[in-house]
Image (spheres, grey):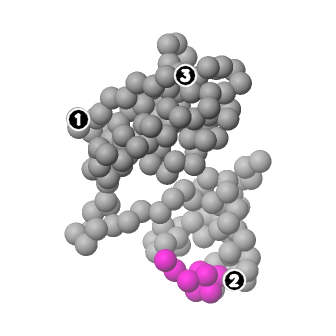
Amino acid sequence: MKRLLDRADERILAELTRNARIPHAELAERVSLSRNAVRQRIDRLERDGHIQGYTIVASDGQARTAAVAAMMFVYRHDRMRGGDVIQALKRIPEIVSCDVMSGEFDLVLRVEACATDRIREIWQEVAAVPGVRDTLTAFALSSMIKR
């Protein structure tokens, strides 16, 4: 269950936004909590999805992006009881989003990887997941809006 953020959580997030590598001891001092309390709150913020992943920034100051993006449309054998498929997909780090769809397709995955060969490997892995009936993959030619 996601908890509401309190003032201490908001201050922790603000400090981490300024400097994500701040040591827990220094962060604790800035937000007036113990180091252990800060660590526990960061763990909870990660579990609750307020902190998601980490970004690597290239030497030019720009965030690195994957070289190749593809959309995978997934058909499951059983739409209503296909939760095992989604759990398996969560274990593939290059799958950056998974949406359950109405209409013809069951799931739409956005996959971002370093190379087309890695997209092919992911496609093979997804196709081999028990419960996946079929897939269709389309490569992104360019990204016009990315937020």
Q: Is residue 119 left or right of residue 100?
A: left
Q: Is residue 111 above or below residue 48?
A: above
The image shows residue 16 at horizontal and vertical percentages of 52, 70
- Percent of width and height locating residue 35: 69, 83
Please name which of the two marks, 2 or 3, marks the residue nearer to the observer. Answer: 3
Is residue 7 something that shows in the picture?
no
Residue nearest the viewer, comparing 134 with 34: 134
Q: Earlier in the sequence, mark 2 or mark 1?
A: 2
Q: CA distance from mark 1 to mark 3?
A: 26 Å
Range drawn in magenta? 21-28
- 37 over 49 or under it: above or below: below
Give the SS element for disc 3. Answer: strand
Q: Which mark is residue 141?
A: 1
Residue tagged 2: 35
Q: Which residue is mark 3?
A: 133
User: Residue at position x 27%, y 63% from top?
Assistant: 62
Dot 1 alpha-carbon crowd within 10 angstroms: few under 14, some 14 to 19, many 20 or more: few
Prevailing secondary structure class for the magenta stretch in the rendered image: helix
Which residue type carries mark 2? Arg
Residue 110 image offset from top left, x and y in percent: 42, 37
